[in-house]
Amino acid sequence: MITRTNELGPAGITISSTEFLATVAARELAGKHRVFAGVGLPTLAVDLAMRTVAPDIQLVYESGVCGAHPEGMAEGIADSVLVSGAEAVVNMQALFGYVLQGGHVDVGFLGAAQVDRWGSLNTSFIGDWESPTVRLPGSGGAADIVPNARECITVLRRHDPGAFPAALDFCTSPSPVRARDLDPRAVPPGHGVSTVITPLAVLRRPDRFGELQLAQVHPGVQIDQVREATGWDLAVAADVVETPWPTEEDVRLLREEIDTVRLYLR
Amino acid sequence: MSEVKVRGLSEAIAEHVEDGMTVALEGFGHLIPFAAGHEIIRQGRKDLTLCRMTPDLIADQMIAAGCVRKLIASFFASGSAGSLHEVRRRIERSDPEPLEVEEYSHYGMYGRYQAAAAGLPFFPLKSYAGSDLPTLNPRIRKVEDPYGGPDIHVVPALAPDVTVVHAQRADRFGNVQVWGIVGAIQEVAYAAKKVIVTVEEIVDDEVVRSDPNRTLVPAHAVDAVVHVPGGAHPSYAQGHYDRDNVFYRDWTAISKDPQLLRSWLQEWVHDLPDRAAYLEHLGEQRWQDNTVGERLSGQVDYGRRSS
């Protein structure tokens, strides 16, 4: 398994894998407005984005909270701190039906255990469905978010052929490519997964019916290394760029203002 | 005059929950009816079909206690606390026994309650096109749109025999008021044949009627109202007490070890008569750690006709 462990950044700060991924993810939110955020890395990333590149983000949670203004870091999508001071708390038909399926979410922010070349996600099973090696958390809202959000960003903590297989063990949340293959008339409105952030690279899917492409490599990572760590013949964009390091200010915000109790920062 | 429905918890569970029933315990991260779940364990109910969007620790506990034959749910972990190991052991290794599972996405599960609440056969939604979920669970089906649109997935109505929910307050008739995250409380109450509501407070009729928009479940949908302060711990009740995050984090280690899990159930459920004893066992200090400060809402004026 290839993960990014503690490394020395350019400013002489040791940066953890979580801090690095959260910073890369936060920058992807520049210019976005309504973000449907999960817990963990997405919590760190949206908070950092609001303090840096995207001050106008409106946070939406599947618990029904819209426009959260938490006074502390949320320990879950249904944390009381998200409710106090929020702009709205709506019921679940309003949240999943009107806000999400009605087309008001710009970005869905999700984790996954496996991603395939079209950006379909597995969060359900590793191994055989009947007697799985690992019973993963399942859909939750993921199978509702991926088809209906304008686009989705996915963050994975590992990059190897197990996490990026040629074929998923189970497709929980499908790419529009899979939906089109089954029924061209019933393709959901969303782009599906547009961006995948990993410990090695950023993959992008600029075409709604296209494949993921290697668009960005993290400092010190070679293009071939990413291709070898991917379970299919990964396409490479014409102009692969290098991911900039987190700034000292990014790291300070994460440690001293966002996750002061080190709940998600590891 | 409306009927007064105030009951004791053991009385309400004994009256309404029978072996083999389909029982929904809802509350989306908030207001999870733990005290009622523990009473179901204490009374030794068996072969239940347990419905919960997010099973949470309460499902892990009820399954470990041998109450549950089948789980209908849309998530199989516990948010920040990670895996529910009793659930995983049963699904991955049938250890100590298999657990039948019927799974949906959140909107699908919620839609099932909505359909049942409204007396409809099914609920249509745009999720699942291309997903393996309909293959895994053939109860997720596709129907033709009679108005000429593309075929659409539907989920069947889910009408539990009994629903138990927890709320901040109700009056003696069972007009239930909730604030904060409402989850599927209203839908699952109307979906079920019988409804038990445990509450932090039973308040005067006039308190409820001073703010009728706050009533999420009207009394006509409720069969029993039970006063159970602290009944949602270790989850929370907005404005009353916060989630006991330490408990949630500790659960991972407890549920990972079947022996430890069984002795936890013995100590915290079987050996205690009720929720008051549970809170006493938890201790004043632990309770104080999760108290919350005041953040009052503003007031609205409903108006009064002057003549």
Image (tube, coloured by chain):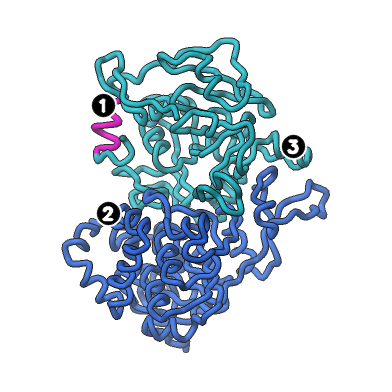
Chain colours: A cyan, B blue
Q: Which residues are magenta?
A: A251-260
Q: Chain of mark 2?
A: B
Q: Is residue A252 magenta?
A: yes
> Marks 3 and 2, Cα distance to the nearest angstrom?
46 Å
Q: How many marks?
A: 3
Amino acid type at image mark 3: Arg
- Can you identify the residue that label 1 sits on? A252
Q: Residue at x 40, y 60 (%)?
A: B57
Q: Give the residue at the far left of this rendering.
A: B285
Residue for badge 3? A180
Residue drawn at (36%, 42%), measured in percent from left and top? A69
Read off the residue under disc 2: B246
Q: Is residue A165 left or right of residue B25?
A: right
Q: CA distance from mark 3 to mark 1?
A: 45 Å
Whether residue A144 appears in this view of the structure is no
- Judged from the image, the secondary structure of the residue bearing numbered disc 3 is helix
For the question of whether residue B191 can be seen, the reply is yes
Q: Is residue B118 above or below residue A131?
A: below
Q: Residue B201 in the image: x percent, y percent?
A: 32, 73
Residue B46: x, y in percent? 49, 77
Asked whether A99 falls inside the magenta stretch, the response is no
- In this view, B231 is above or below B9: above
Toward which corner of the image does residue B71 lie, by quadrant? bottom right
